[in-house]
Image (cartoon, rainbow, N blue to C red):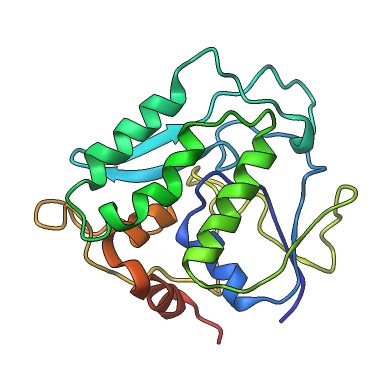
Amino acid sequence: MSQVVLSSAYFPNIQYISKFLAHDDIIIDIYEHYSKQTYRNRCNILSANGILPLIVPVKKNYHCLIKDIEIDYSERWQKTHERAILSAYKNSPFYEYYIDEFIIFFQKKEKYLYDLNNQILNKILDILRIEKKYSFSGDFILSDDILNYRETISPKASKNKPDPYFKSYPYIQVFSEKIEFIPNLSILDLIFMHGPMSKEFIKKSMLIK
């Protein structure tokens, strides 16, 4: 398939991960300017009360490139995220099986956001057995001849444009008995619920084979 450019993402959603199955040439742009209120430093999980955003605080970032964004540890956000994930998924079928794979990201302190995101992405691809290499940009990528998902995979409804290559495939979620299916959450939601079958659910969401 054609070349694709993605932003860096914290515990990326299912749509984001699907690009690693759909395309062979994937570039993560670390020379774009940081944007607030995006998946670059946040993800959405499912709590008993609905969607819960987990946000990584960053140091002041005026006109700063993604590669230079530093994580702010003045807040105890790691403990907050760890507890939120425990509360949300402790009763899910595969929580105990996979939580140790992720707990390290709430214990060590990476200086740069993109380093943390990259390590998380590598772990996710390993768990899902997606053997797909990707590269980082050496400069800002102009998107005339490339599929650009840097802004369209977004938590903001106004920016999250329809993706002709992706449609969320419903699966059982941890609070399905009382909450209607919520699509395209962090990949954590799918992994904790469906474990080794997660990759198959991603494939069912892809509109290109």
Q: Quadrant of the C terminus?
A: bottom right
Using the image as rendered, state which of residue 175 and residue 83 is in the foreground.
Answer: 83
Q: Percent position (x, y) of residue 107?
A: 48, 31
Where residue 44 sits in the image (x, y, percent)?
A: 40, 44
Quadrant the N terminus occupies: bottom right
Residue at the location (69% across, 25% down)? 70
Whether residue 169 is visible, yes or no, is yes
In the foreground, 94 or 158: 94
Q: Specify whether 96 is left or right of 152.
A: left
- Please tell me which residue is depicted at 21% across the width and 60% down the height of the picture: 93
77 vs 89, left or right, is: right
Left or right of 203 in this view: 10: right
Q: Could you tell me residue 100's position as x and y percent?
A: 38, 48
Q: Is residue 112 above or below residue 97?
A: above
Q: Residue furthest left?
A: 177
Residue at point 84% right, 63% down? Answer: 144
What residue lies at 52% left-to-right and 73% top-to-bottom?
129
Please state if 147 lies on the left or on the right of 100 as rendered: right
For the residue pair 9 and 86, the one nearer the viewer reads as: 86
